């Protein structure tokens, strides 16, 4: 059984930055175990799980193992702790030459030569290894069992259709949920597959688009963070009453942060800025919008509240307290040499304070030194907010006792 009130876990996108999410979840699992003791194994804390891009992969892994929350978090942690880029994309010289080198050739030398050579690379990198990892990591065949056992209410992943220009939320639920539609946003109930996860995590330009069938028509899809104007919407539509939101970047920069002038921006700087707007900005704006709605609802009298379908949604947002770009700058040397050579062509290089293009590289740094530091930051940030986390879930009010139900199954005793 999942805990009530119905709590949603919302995981944003961000490529390798999603390691931070696993650190947060690891700390939450530990805080929950400390607060509830053996009772922690009885219930899944998240009835709704919604994810985008790399967050969709983390979300699906947790959803398929909803009956063993702590174990599923540890499985994810082992993967992220031992990550190497070749588990996600072809990082060898031949793989890079076949994809990225041809792609950069088209940019630098021109379409005439590319056409003459009949070179049609689809992306900077080939993410074929990721498909193999998903097959091993995410047993989607267990999802229906999780619904039947009431361990999970719903799972949602998002992707963006290059075919129609619309943003799609693909979801599966224990009971039918009426699809919703907004401007340029469509919700589609479906049986989720690894293809949906590949589509959701197909970073634009970096990884190739994936094809999915929608209404009996083939669509090409890319990363779900693109055109995602309301990342909290799927969880709310699926019935969540409170949201734990884990970001992949700082929600806002300190006021007055000094930036040294560095001449005309490189292609890597521009690309990093563009990816930040895709992966990070929409979440901060949607959280701000939800909090504004909550404040407005708090001012309404009961009679007015009865006339609206809006309801207050409790939220807890946990995001990095340090700049992920700065962390990435310390680990550029961990990238495989062929990938470093490729990225050097667009302006990524250096190390530490002399690093350039670290923002772009941070999305591709699926290397253990970087992912481990991000996980450690996620754990530290969460433990620092221990009391806030316990209050949000109500674990600070849980009594460490049990009562026996008719069938002899222990249940949680509330004060």
Image (cartoon, rainbow, N blue to C red):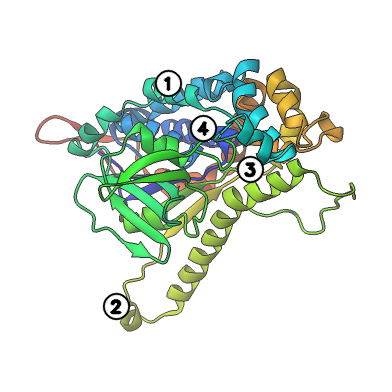
Q: CA distance from mark 4 to mark 2?
A: 39 Å
Q: Residue furthest front?
A: 116
Q: Which mark is residue 12?
A: none
Q: Which residue is mark 2?
A: 306
Q: Secondary structure at mark 4?
A: helix
- Residue at 57% x, 61% y is 285
Q: CA distance from mark 4 to mark 1?
A: 20 Å
Q: Which residue is mark 1?
A: 132
- Say which label, 4 or 1, has the lower sequence index: 4
Q: Which residue is mark 3?
A: 320
Taking 91 as reference, is 387 above or below it?
Answer: below
Along the line of sight, the residue nearer the viewer: 163 or 238: 163
Tell me, yes or no, whether the two marked residues, 4 and 3, touch with CB atoms within 8 Å. no
Q: Which mark is residue 22?
A: 4
- Say which label, 3 or 2, has the lower sequence index: 2
- Say which label, 2 or 1, has the lower sequence index: 1
Along the line of sight, the residue nearer the viewer: 246 or 356: 356
Q: CA distance from mark 3 to mark 2?
A: 38 Å
Q: CA distance from mark 2 to mark 1?
A: 50 Å
Disc nearest the viewer among 1 and 3: 1
Q: Position of residue 356 (x, y in %)?
A: 81, 37
Q: Position of residue 74 (x, y in %)?
A: 45, 23
- Say which label, 4 or 2, has the lower sequence index: 4
Disc nearest the viewer among 3 and 2: 3
Taking 48 as reference, is 122 above or below it?
Answer: above
């Amino acid at each position: 059984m999942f805990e009530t009130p119905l709590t949603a876990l919302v995981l944003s996108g961000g490529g390798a930055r999603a390691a931070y999410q696993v650190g947060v979840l690891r700390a939450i699992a530990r805080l929950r175990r400390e607060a509830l003791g053996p009772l922690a194994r009885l219930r899944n804390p998240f009835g709704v799980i919604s994810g985008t891009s790399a967050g969709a992969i983390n979300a699906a892994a947790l959803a398929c193992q909803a009956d063993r929350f702590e174990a599923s978090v540890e499985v994810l942690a082992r993967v992220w702790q031992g990550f190497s880029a070749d588990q996600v994309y072809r990082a060898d010289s031949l793989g890079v030459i076949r994809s990225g080198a041809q792609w950069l050739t088209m940019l630098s030398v021109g379409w005439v030569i590319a056409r003459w050579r009949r070179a049609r690379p689809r992306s900077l990198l080939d993410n074929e290894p990721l498909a193999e990892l998903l097959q091993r990591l995410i047993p989607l065949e267990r999802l229906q069992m999780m619904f039947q056992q009431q361990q999970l209410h719903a799972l949602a992943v998002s992707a963006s259709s290059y075919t129609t220009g619309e943003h799609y939320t693909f979801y599966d639920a224990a009971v039918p949920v009426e699809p919703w539609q907004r401007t340029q946003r469509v919700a589609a109930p479906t049986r989720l597959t690894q293809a949906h996860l590949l589509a959701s995590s197909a970073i634009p330009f970096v990884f190739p688009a994936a094809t999915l069938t929608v209404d009996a028509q083939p669509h090409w899809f890319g990363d779900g963070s693109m055109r995602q104007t309301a990342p909290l919407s799927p969880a709310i539509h699926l019935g969540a009453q409170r949201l734990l939101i884990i970001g992949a970047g700082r929600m806002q920069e300190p006021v007055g942060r000094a930036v040294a002038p560095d001449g005309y921006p490189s292609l890597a700087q521009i690309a990093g800025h563009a990816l930040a707007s895709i992966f990070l900005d929409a979440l901060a704006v949607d959280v701000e919008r939800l909090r504004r709605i909550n404040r407005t609802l708090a001012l309404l009298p009961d009679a007015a509240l009865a006339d609206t379908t809006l309801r207050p949604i409790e939220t807890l947002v946990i995001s990095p307290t340090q700049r992920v770009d700065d962390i990435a700058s310390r680990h550029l040397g961990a990238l495989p040499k062929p990938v470093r050579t490729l990225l050097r062509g667009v302006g990524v290089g250096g190390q530490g304070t002399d690093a350039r293009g670290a923002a772009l590289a941070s999305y591709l740094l699926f290397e253990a030194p970087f992912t481990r530091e991000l996980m450690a930051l996620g754990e530290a940030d969460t433990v620092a907010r221990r009391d806030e986390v316990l209050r949000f879930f109500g674990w600070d009010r849980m009594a460490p006792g049990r009562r026996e139900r008719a069938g002899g199954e222990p249940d949680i005793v509330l004060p």
